[in-house]
Image: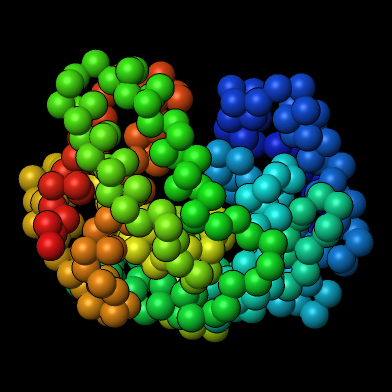
Amino acid sequence: MGLPQVIDVPEALVASYTRNGGDEELAWVARLPHLVAELLDRWGLERDGGLACGEASLVVPVRRPDATRAALRLQMPREETTAALIGLRAWDGDGIVRLLDHDPESSAMLLERLDPSRTLARVEDDDLAMGTLASIMGRLHRVPAPEGLRGLGDVAREMLASVPAAATALADPADRRRLGAWASAVTELVGDPGDRMLHWDLHYGNVLAAEREPWLAIDPEPLVGDPGFDLWPALDSGWEELRAAGDAPRVVRRRFDLLTEALGLDRPRAAGWTLARLLQNTLWDIEDGRTAIDVSQTVVAEALPRS
């Protein structure tokens, strides 16, 4: 006998939507059991394991009518879920989890099943892990960007417009100078934002073991832009472990060298777009009430090449 088709929404997901959302978000969470049951019935799926969730999504392991293993992923429809669908259709499984089906109304996705217990973070040799990630990233960047995705130029201009007000929230003058320097780097690049399709969140935790290939990427947030803007999540992978080992600057420099060489990137340009990511992250932190630049951001900035 299979698992019950009616689910109980994980408490962690309910708590996340309660903490970060309003009435619309809570109504979506309340409807999840019905939506899951409806999709299982429509696609002839049987539950095949325990539920998993992130901050915003629910994943239900399933088997299809032909007994192949898959994963039903649900997230409240937003701009980023639409972008993910556009990207997954364009990549068609080339270096990334394959989209098997989707529901346009709810943005639910039926995905190829990967192994969430084995991420690239399990690979002890960091050069090997980073080389694997770089290979996947290069494959993703080679696919022409389809219509319907946001462009990095618009994102960068929005960031620059936010800097003057955000700087006033930083308590340390040194942090205000850092923010200004990062904004200056972005100003130099914003006129040529690039045309590649980016993953936007490719780090060790978003590369899972698979059957079709040894490793595949998951959870894209596609954006059209310069490949250098895609490097920061990889540079920052396993930050807590790096900080504990006191080895973060060396590892960041080594990773930057490996990524830029493998992807054939111009190093100063890649460094500049990485500073754009640090600017973006800091602006988000300030929106959340932070009054200082996170130490991980400063370590990455200081480890980048100057020329």
Figure quadrant of residue 298? top left
Is residue 46 rendered to the left or right of residue 121?
right
Identified at 50% across, 40% down, the residue is: 158
Picture quadrant of residue 82: bottom right
Percent position of residue 102, x then y: 78, 63
Task: Tell me, yes or no, if residue 272 can be seen here.
Answer: yes
The image shows a total of numbered marks equal to 0
Q: In the image, what residue occupies the spot 12% across and 57% down?
A: 306
Colouring used for the render: rainbow
Task: Judge left or right: residue 218 versus residue 175.
Answer: right
Q: Position of residue 240 (x, y in %)?
A: 24, 43
> Does residue 72 appear anywhere in the picture?
no
Q: In which quarter of the image is residue 295?
A: top left
- Could you say where residue 57 lies in the image, as x and y percent from the top left? 63, 45
Left or right, 160 with reference to 27: left
Q: Residue furthest bottom?
A: 212
Q: Quadrant of the C terminus?
A: bottom left
Residue drawn at 28 percent across, 63 percent down: 270
Q: Position of residue 148 (x, y in %)?
A: 69, 62
Q: Which quadrant: the N terminus?
A: bottom right
Position of 291 relative to 7 (above/below):
above
Where 239 sits versus 251, above or below? above
Residue drawn at (23%, 78%), measured in percent from left and top? 261
Considering depth in this image, is 150 or 25 the residue closer to the camera? 150
Q: Is 108 left or right of 49, judged from the image as shown? A: right
Residue toward you, 132 or 165: 165
Along the viewing direction, whichever of 4 and 151 lies nearer the viewer: 151
